[in-house]
Amino acid sequence: MGACPLCHSPTRGDAGTQCSCGYEFGQSPEKAIELLLSQRRNASINLVLLLGALGGAVATIIAAGPIIIAGPLFGVLALKTARTVRTLSITRESLRQLRMRQLPKAQLLLRD
């Protein structure tokens, strides 16, 4: 039993099967790295946008007081931001693990 490199969900990992996040097992490490880099880029963009929206919600709460809409909106944005940070963390760890697997093995050369 392994884990999906994109979402880290536990899975069998047989070639030809697909994770619930959409990753197809059996792909080359290069393809997995390509997918992870795309996921990292998208999550980074989302994080910047969410932080801007959070700042706007905070400014609205400060300027207008805790109005009915701004409070729940702040909570939803904070939750989405936390999930995006988690996605970035998982993506970085998956990239690190895949890149370590691609490193060539060291060999000891003996001189005669």
Image (cartoon, rainbow, N blue to C red):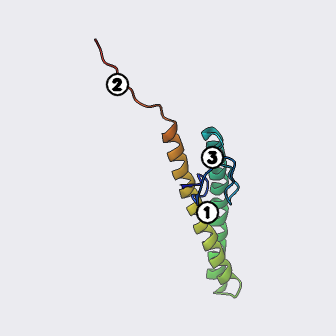
> Which quadrant holds residue 34?
top right
In the drawing, does residue 104 fall left or right of residue 13? left
Residue, disc 2: 108
Q: Which is more toward the observer, 23 or 18?
A: 18
Is 39 rendered above or below residue 111? below
N-terminal-most mark, 3 or 1: 3
Number of marks present in the image shown: 3
Q: Amino acid at mark 1?
A: Thr
Residue 82 x, y percent position in the rendering: 58, 68
Dot 1: few (<14), some (14–19), or many (≥20) neighbours within 10 Å? many
Residue, disc 3: 37
What whole-number distance in Å separates the C-alpha atoms at marks 2 and 3?
34 Å
Is 96 rendered above or below residue 78? above
Q: Quadrant of the N terminus?
A: bottom right
Q: Are marks 2 and 1 in contact (CB under 8 Å)?
A: no
Q: Secondary structure at mark 3?
A: helix
Is 49 rendered above or below residue 106? below
> Which quadrant holds residue 98?
top right
Camera-near label (2 vs 3) is 2
What whole-number distance in Å separates the C-alpha atoms at marks 2 and 1?
43 Å
What whole-number distance in Å separates the C-alpha atoms at marks 3 and 1?
15 Å
Query: What is the number of the mark on residue 84?
Result: 1
Q: Quadrant of the C terminus?
A: top left
Identity of the residue drawn at 65% across and 65% down: 50
Dot 3: few (<14), some (14–19), or many (≥20) neighbours within 10 Å? some
